[in-house]
Image (tube, grey):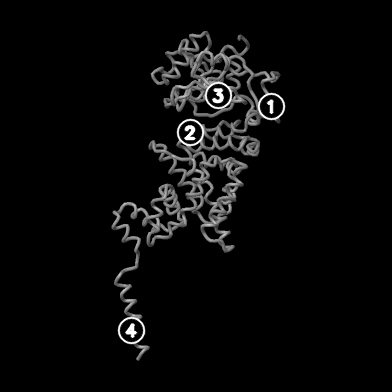
Amino acid sequence: MQDQYSNPSILIPRAEHCISRANISENALKVLYRLKGAGFQAYLVGGGVRDLLLGREPKDFDVATDATPEEVRRVFRNCRLIGRRFRLAHVHFGREIIEVATFRGTSDDNDERKLENGMIVRDNSYGSIGEDALRRDFTINALYYNIADFSVLDFADGTADIERGVLRLIGDAEQRFREDPVRMLRAIRFASKLGFTLHPSCEAPLHEMGALLHSVPAARLFEEVLKLFHAGTALNAFDRLRHYDLFAHLFPQTEASLSREEHAFPITFVNRGLDNTDRRIGEGKPVTPAFLFAVLLWEPVRLRAAELERAQQAPAAAMQQAASDVLSRQQDHVAVPKRFSLQMREIWGLQHRFEARRGKRPQRLSSHPRFRAAYDFLVLRAESGEVETELADWWTQYQETNPQDRERMSQGDRDPAKRRRRRGGRRRKESAAGE
């Protein structure tokens, strides 16, 4: 399709950029070459091109083409079509999935593109590569690697913004945020992940438009929060979210708790939890959404449990009820799937059991399937000053000792000699009374 957008503003030949096919997924190359062989245009696009130009290893590779989703499916037997809002083709290679998107059009007259209150609710209007570029959110993502001649097409001065370290929206920022409020979270994520500064035109609306996030399905926001906090820059993202008043729209209970706290440990606890997540990701260790959300929601849960205990509820029952109350309210904002919320409840519910260190209780607790996560949670509480470090140190030592020493530790101050002295004292008292 030839139109006013067909010619890129900048064409960077292979000799003038650093992208090598050696750094591109073998399966992504298969998709590019097969589409090209079938007579379609095929480009590596978006974050993969951006990261390669920055010398980073892309997390995934996306492809853009003039083939419709149905035509892509006819080319690849290992292809599935997904999405209603955006129709996409997923080409499966074992555990790796290459996402293939058809060039998007810019016309609002097409029945396949639907907006409600300025927000895109369906968008399957197809167009040219130039139109597709203008539909992308940030300039640094409007970059296309052409498998035909290995050049890079830059439609929005994205390469210049990469060199300057600036994150800039394509078009009017306020309109783009209204079209898809999640772009506000993407702006925070990219700025945190890449260490870029937000362009003033992109930054200014953030303080005022956070309420638009309430129009986004809570399940979608869960996925976006995971991307924010599991990118290795969670602490930076958290600070930016609070700075732009966006965190309160995602976790209103937590924000309210942190804002009114007189003690330092709640915010310290969240900061340490997010820093711990960043370090684990940096070291290639696994992280779980359950632990992340348990950290983010702990303060409102803790305060609610304390309130219930003052109303004479037992600690275990109070914690269980507090977890239900907080999670129920949270579902309206960022919906936590049940498979994770059940784990969060266990992590929270085990905290009071760490106080019981006598008899068989330590052994029973240490055999619980969620013990390790709950212990790590306890350590964070101790490091932030919420509980005594002696408690966390005791459990650290308990895990490192042999079974005999564990049994000795669980006896505590119940020294046999002390017990004998108490028995002797009682006998002497009875004897004196008999006289």
C-alpha gap between disc 1 and disc 4: 90 Å
Residue bearing the label numbered 3: 139
Q: Secondary structure at mark 4?
A: helix
Q: Nearer the viewer, residue 283 or 239?
A: 283
Q: How far is the residue under mark 3 from the one under mark 1?
A: 23 Å
Along the horizontal axis of the image, is 127 left or right of 10?
Answer: right
Number of marks in picture? 4
Residue 230: x %, y % from top left: 47, 37
- Name the outermost residue toward the bottom: 435
Contact (CB < 8 A) between labels 4 and 2?
no
Calculate the distance from the C-alpha at mark 1 to the C-alpha at mark 2.
Answer: 30 Å
Discs 3, 1 touching: Cβ within 8 Å:
no
Report the residue marked by disc 2: 193
Spatial distance from mark 4 to mark 3, Cα to Cα? 89 Å
Q: Which mark is residue 428?
A: 4
Question: Can you give x and y, in whole percent of width and height, for residue 202 in the image?
Answer: 59, 31
User: Tag 1 or tag 3, which sits nearer the N-term?
Assistant: 1
Q: Residues within 10 Å of mark 3 (few under 14, many from 20)?
A: many
Q: Is residue 233 above or below residue 269?
A: above
Tag 2: residue type? Answer: Lys
Determine which of the numbered discs, if any, sits on residue 36 in the image. none
**Image quadrant for the N terminus?**
top right
Q: Nearer the viewer, mark 1 or mark 2?
A: 1
Q: What residue does disc 1 label?
A: 115
Earlier along the polypeptide chain: callout 1 or callout 2? 1
- Cα distance between the residues tagged 4 and 2: 74 Å
Asked if labels 2 and 1 touch by Cβ distance under 8 angstroms, the answer is no
- Against 193, is 139 above or below? above
Choose top left, top right, bottom left or bottom right for residue 59. Answer: top left
- Sequence-wise first label, 4 or 3: 3
Q: Badge 4: few (under 14), some or many (20 or more) residues near its Cα, within 10 Å?
A: few
Between 375 and 119, the residue placed more toward the observer is 375
